[in-house]
Amino acid sequence: MFKLQKSKLLLATSLLTMASAANAGYSFNLTDNDTITFGGYIKADVRSISGDVSSPVTNDDYWIGHAANIDDLSTTKFSVNETRINAKYVHGDVTGFIEMDFLGGGGNQIISNSSHPRLRHAFIKYKSILVGQTWTTFQNTSSLAEAADFGGPLNASAFIRQGQIRYTNGGLQVSLENPHSDKGDSSQDSIPDFIAKYTFKGDWGNVSVSGLARQLNTVGGDTESAVGFGVAGRIKTFGKDDFRFQVHGGNTGRYVGVVAARDLVGEEAEETTSYMVAYRHFWTDDMRSTVFYGSTDADLANTKRNHVAVNLFKNYTKQLSFGVEIGNFEMDEINKSSDYLQFSAKYVL
């Protein structure tokens, strides 16, 4: 037994070394029942922004739902922080997955441009049960727009990774997820968020319908019930083209828009309306463009955030692509916006 375990350890160690040397884009069969896969991508971006708003939370790496008014902004940044690596281990009916990128902050642009690694996913899946951190069940990841700007119109997209327990049965998924009263008293959050989603699939694509129910705790010591809904999907059109969309409403709060709206405004649950649309067209087999638009209106805060862009990507190999994107992010409530131009190179491991 000891020799067997030692052999497995040596094999796994050698495979890790091989994977690292080969950009970690490979799957290895450790036994007839055990597989380990390494993946991710390397992405380099050059991004210029000019106008009157900036995204200071992410140091202008990409737009989120929040922005700051900075008059006469003009900045150019080189970045590789979106680069990510992951590993998946499969043992029969059990899957373990972990992924990180380098958007965790830190770094020194004077000397080394180091960046902190950031945990994205870490979960265990056994048959129909998933436990750990990954995309919220409320989200339809296939509906996200392809973009050089990370995630496309995040200001209007369902977009959260968090701890959860999820059950899947065909197209039905239900989950209990980490509660958090944004702009409230999160120290009193004791009831998990409840989410249910059903996804219709076919040769034509997919459409999901999701619902969200939460209890929010206010700073004043009260509780507010919050319910929201979402309809999202990716539909095939002509040739390889597709249409992607998301529509959300109700008290979606932090689940939609990446702080375009907050859970609570004072002692009341915020109500928002969000939608995004994206159309991807293939000019040739290796060249494609996406045009997208996203908008979120928050009722109590009286804010509106818009993001529009168009891009062009070309694959030079199956793994290597280059792209360019031009767009505009707007804080409609103060009539301020910024234009951006971004060049990207991406190598999928």
Image: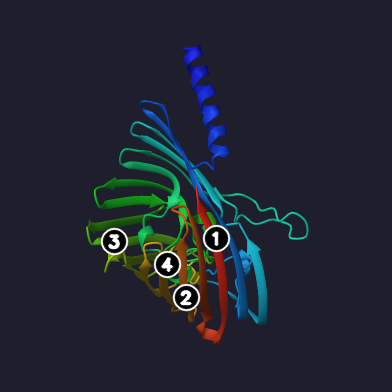
Neighbor class of circle 2 (other Cα within 10 Å; few <14, some 14-19, many 20+) is many
Callouts 4 and 3 close, C-beta under 8 Å: no
Compare marks 2 and 4 and give the one earlier in the sequence: 4
Judged from the image, the secondary structure of the residue bearing numbered disc 2 is: strand
Whether label 1 touches label 2, CB < 8 Å: no
Local packing at callout 4 (Cα closer than 10 Å; few below 14, some 14-19, many 20+) is: many
For the residue marked with disc 4, what is the amino acid?
A: Ser
Task: Kindly identify the amino acid type of the residue bearing the numbered disc 2.
Answer: Ala
- Residue corresponding to mark 4: 157
Crowdedness near tag 3: few (<14), some (14–19) or many (≥20) residues, C-alpha within 10 Å: many
User: Disc 1 or disc 3, which is closer to the eye?
Assistant: 1
Q: Secondary structure at mark 1?
A: strand
Q: Which residue is mark 1?
A: 345
Instruction: Please state which amino acid type lies under the numbered disc 3.
Output: Ser
Q: Which residue is mark 3?
A: 208
Q: State the SS at label 4.
A: loop
Q: State the image coordinates of residue 160 (x, y, percent, origin top left).
A: 46, 58
Lower position in the chain sequence, tag 1 or tag 3 = 3
Q: In the rendered image of this protein, does residue 57 appear above or below residue 35? A: below
In which image quadrant can residue 270 be found?
A: bottom left
Whole-number angstrom distance, CA of label 2 to CA of label 4: 15 Å
- Marks 4 and 3, Cα distance to the nearest angstrom? 14 Å
Image x and y of residue 166, in percent: 35, 47
Q: Is residue 24 left or right of residue 237?
A: right
**Pointer 1 local density, CA inside 10 Å: few below 14, some 14–19, many at least 20:** some
- Front-lying residue, 145 or 273: 145
Between the C-alphas of marks 2 and 3, the distance is 25 Å
Judged from this view, the residue extending furthest toward the right is 110
The residue indicated by pointer 2 is 309
Of badges 2 and 3, nearer the viewer stands 2
